[in-house]
């Protein structure tokens, strides 16, 4: 099976799994509100860089209620290194917000941000104690303050 056929099969299976259990794509608390606030802000640009295929990411984001066609989404379709995915996403955002702030929930996110010299904000239990800037979820008012936003205001 070639890669496009495999990807299509994978995304079809993922769609089936999400249809059977939509709770599997429940976003981290506060993610939707923060994404809207950042996107509507005059001082931020938002992009989503992910290590999965763009089509599967788009499906999961849609199921979680987090999709927005105005936000660049870059996956691993054309890049294998997370740093390259992040750089390309930043280019699509026209490079505003220097230096970039990358928000992630995996060690690979932290390592890629460090490799690029980008600011990093860690979210969730996997990164507790691993990053100077860590928050349990996106509802923490200190996170919103760090990003120059008023918590819960969109």
Image: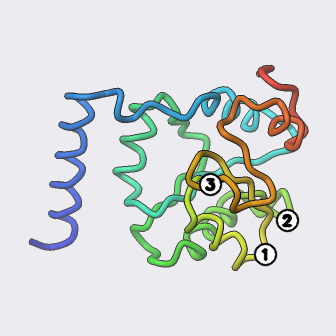
Is residue 131 toward the left or the right of residue 49 in the image? right
Mark 3–mark 1 CB contact (< 8 Å):
no
90 in relation to 2, above or below: above
Q: Marks 3 and 1, how far apart in space? A: 15 Å
The picture places residue 45, in percent across and down from the top left corner, at: 76, 48
Q: Marks 2 and 1, how far apart in space? A: 8 Å
Q: Which mark is residue 99?
A: 2
Q: Residue at x 86, y 38 (%)?
A: 42
Secondary element at image label 3 = strand
Is residue 152 toward the left or the right of residue 50 in the image? right
Q: Which corner quadrant of the image does residue 77 belong to?
A: bottom left
Residue behind mark 3: 104
Q: Residue at x 68, y 30 (%)?
A: 36
Q: Quadrant of the C terminus?
A: top right
Q: Quadrant of the N terminus?
A: bottom left
Residue behind mark 1: 117
Chain-order first, disc 2 or disc 1: 2
Q: Which corner quadrant of the image does residue 24 belong to?
A: top left
Packing grade of label 2 (10 A; few <14, some 14-19, many >=20) is few
Is residue 33 toward the left or the right of residue 118 in the image? left
Mark 2–mark 1 CB contact (< 8 Å):
yes
Packing grade of label 1 (10 A; few <14, some 14-19, many >=20) is few
23 in relation to 113, above or below: above
Packing grade of label 3 (10 A; few <14, some 14-19, many >=20) is some
Q: Which corner quadrant of the image does residue 113 belong to?
A: bottom right
Q: Residue at x 62, y 67 (%)?
A: 86
Q: Residue at x 21, y 37 (%)?
A: 17
The picture places residue 85, in percent across and down from the top left corner, at: 55, 69
Mark 2–mark 3 CB contact (< 8 Å):
no
């Amino acid at each position: 099976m070639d890669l496009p056929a495999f990807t299509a099969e994978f995304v079809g299976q993922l769609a089936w799994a999400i249809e059977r259990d939509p709770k599997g794509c429940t976003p981290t608390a506060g993610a939707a509100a923060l994404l809207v606030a950042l996107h509507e802000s005059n001082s931020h640009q938002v992009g989503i860089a992910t290590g999965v295929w763009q089509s599967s990411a788009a499906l999961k984001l849609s199921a979680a209620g987090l999709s927005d066609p105005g936000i660049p989404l870059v996956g691993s379709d054309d890049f294998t290194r997370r740093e390259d995915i992040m750089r390309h996403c930043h280019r699509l955002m026209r490079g505003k917000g220097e230096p970039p702030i990358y928000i992630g929930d995996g060690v690979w996110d932290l390592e890629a941000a460090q490799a690029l010299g980008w600011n990093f904000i860690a979210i969730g239990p996997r990164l507790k104690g691993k990053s100077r800037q860590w928050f349990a979820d996106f509802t923490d008012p200190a996170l919103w303050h760090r990003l120059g936003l008023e918590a819960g205001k969109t």
